[in-house]
Amino acid sequence: MKKPPIFTLFLLLFLFGSAAFSQNQSFPWPKGKKMALSLSFDDERATNTSLGIPLLNEYGVKATFFVLPNSLKQDLEGWQKAVAAGHEMGNHSIQHPCSGNFVWSRERALENYTLDRMKAELLQANIEIEELLGVRPTVYAYPCGQTFVGKGIYTQSFVPLISEMFLAGRSWMDEAPSDPFYADMAQLTGMEMDNKDFDEILPLIESARKNGQWLVLAGHETANAGNQTTYLSMLRKLSEYATDPANGIWIAPIGTVAKYVLDTRLATSDTTNIPELIRSSANGKLRLTAEKGRAIGPDIKYMPDWRAFGWFTAKDSVVWEVDIPEGTYEVWMEWSVSDEEAGKQFILSAGNESILGKVEKSGSWETFKKVSIGKIKLSSGNQKVIFKSLDQFANGALLDLKEITLEKVGTGK
């Protein structure tokens, strides 16, 4: 393992401030903020336009309101003013379908929906909301927090549909904030703020700030009392707290934060170590990059400046979770090593199959090479692919490992 170039270090520090670039990286919220906070309200309740939105406007807080077209017409002028004030309008469906276990939803039960019907209704809701308010929703909230259509063997998730149609989808009654590096944008967690005092909300904020997370709060009515009501007294204290620069909170609508998170992920995708399941790419290759692997051991480190893992001890290893199609694969390794550290043995294993090899010279720690290390026959299924040292050594290092590529025999490189 080598020291990163001065320019690279400067660039990373410039982009991410004091973010710790290791396997627990801090998300770079704008302007040095410690967390993001989004306020959201469902069902366009009458108290939103009469009481809630005027209060938020006092503090310059912009929230997300998930609306149904027909209900908007009951106070169209009020909702048009909300849009003009900068609040976000999200899609909450045409007729708020939930499970038929809710008796009031039996005539529009999700169990009787298909994916085609759901898509048609979501498109229609977008069209009608845009006609009424002049904005086309880019975010969605699952009515009742339910993400399925059908029943029994016909049950299907419509999360992929939300992922296809919207920038983000928010759930309901969840138990934790969203991790901006990891969260599925189509399944953002929504934590309830109805019928709670500020003292009950504050610990959620403090936890999210400590962990650099995105807290999405979800409510309904905005009044002084009542069921499914975000209390005005709580909302005022929350707005005062969130807009105080000393508290390090970026408060913005869901769509605004979602776009920032996605843009940031894209900009840092090849320098961020977030272990996740590897699937075949469009060309059939399985690319086991350092960014997708899990480091295990006392001294192994992910190095964002080199997009590689650096080994320090024989007890270190990297594990990838891989969805493998059955077949014989040629295995390619991309690595670097100094001449004096070269020559140690390694083993790559998947299931009962393995490849043994020796870390050949690459020229220097700064020079990466990519060569075939052999072939391996693998069965289909979710498997762990493990790379580690075969030699026991007390001093020195094994290599810097950037990527293992599995390529089916007979396919092009």
Image: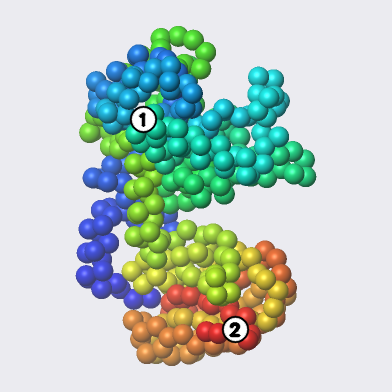
Residue 87 appears anywhere in the view: yes
Outermost residue to the front: 131
Amino acid beneath label 1: Leu
Could you tell me how far apart the alpha carbons at marks 2 and 1 are, in whole angstroms?
52 Å
Q: Position of residue 226 (x, y in %)?
A: 49, 10
Mark carried by residue 133: 1
Between discs 2 and 1, the one toward the N terminus = 1
Q: Position of residue 348 (x, y in %)?
A: 60, 78
Q: Please, which colouring scheme is shown?
A: rainbow
User: Which residue is rendered at x = 34% and y = 41% of the image?
Assistant: 256
- The residue furthest right is 153
Q: Which residue is painted at 44% across and 26% down in the image? A: 41
- Amino acid found under the numbered disc labelled 2: Thr
Q: Which mark is residue 37?
A: none
Front in this rendered view, residue 78 or 281: 78
| Helix, strand or loop at mark 2 | loop
Quadrant of image for the N terminus: bottom left
Q: Is residue 58 above or below residue 276?
A: above
Graded by Cα atoms within 10 Å as few (under 14), some (14 to 19) or many (20 or more), the crowding at tag 2 reads few
Which residue corresponds to mark 2? Answer: 411
The answer to whether residue 178 is left or right of residue 79 is: right
Rendered location of residue 21, percent (x, y): 36, 59
Q: Is residue 60 above or below residue 160?
A: above
Q: Residue at x 35, y 54 (%)?
A: 263
Q: How many marks?
A: 2
Residue 207 drawn at (x, y percent) = 42, 36
